[in-house]
Image: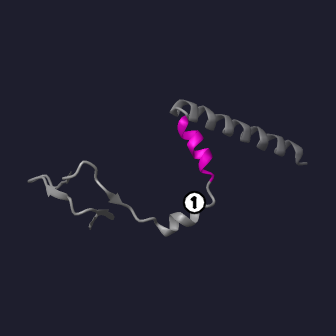
Amino acid sequence: MFAWRGHAIDDQSSLTAWPGSGRTQYTTLVTEARIVIEPDPVIEVFKKDIDRTLLRANLKLSPEERLRKMQSAVSGLRLLREAYAKSRP
């Protein structure tokens, strides 16, 4: 295995440069590439505090539905702030 851009790539794969382009092409010699990505310890610490079910539910929505949901939340927050401001002497 060798590392390329932070990824571990098995020995049955190769990297080739495109002449003159400065870009690299990843070519695999097997049916399926086996890339192993080591977990980042910082991300692992934060993952325990994130409700991934909410993320998955949000990603099931279309972009338009997500925007409507956000606009509704902002509108509710605005109403809450106005009500709080009115309640203060």
Q: Is residue 85 left or right of residue 59?
A: right
**Where is mark 1, residue-wise?**
47
Determine which quarter of the picture holds residue 69. top right
Magenta stretch in the rendered image:
51-60
User: Farthest right residue?
Assistant: 89
Q: Is residue 41 left or right of residue 79?
A: left
Percent coordinates x, y for residue 40 in the rendering: 46, 66
Residue at x 18% of width, y 53% of height: 29
Is residue 54 within the magenta segment?
Answer: yes
Q: Which one is nearer the viewer's eye here, 89 or 65?
A: 65
Write down the quadrant of residue 68 in the picture: top right
Q: Residue at x 45, y 65 (%)?
A: 39
Residue in the image at 31% along x and 56% along y: 34
Tally of numbered tags: 1
Q: Residue at x 73, y 37 (%)?
A: 76
Given residues 20 and 78, the one toward you in this image is: 20
Report the amino acid beneath label 1: Lys
Query: What color scheme is it?
Result: one colour
Q: Quadrant of residue 12?
A: bottom left
Residue 19, percent across and down? 8, 53
Coordinates of residue 27 in the picture (x, y in percent)? 19, 52
| Residue 80 is inside the magenta segment | no
Residue nearest the observer in this picture, 19 or 77: 19
| Quadrant position of the N terminus in the picture | bottom left
SS assignment at label 1: helix
Helix, strand or loop: magenta stretch: helix
Q: Position of residue 11 (x, y in %)?
A: 22, 63
State left or right for residue 85 relative to residue 12.
Answer: right
Please, which residue is most extreme toward the front here? 31
Q: Residues within 10 Å of mark 1 (few under 14, many from 20)?
A: few
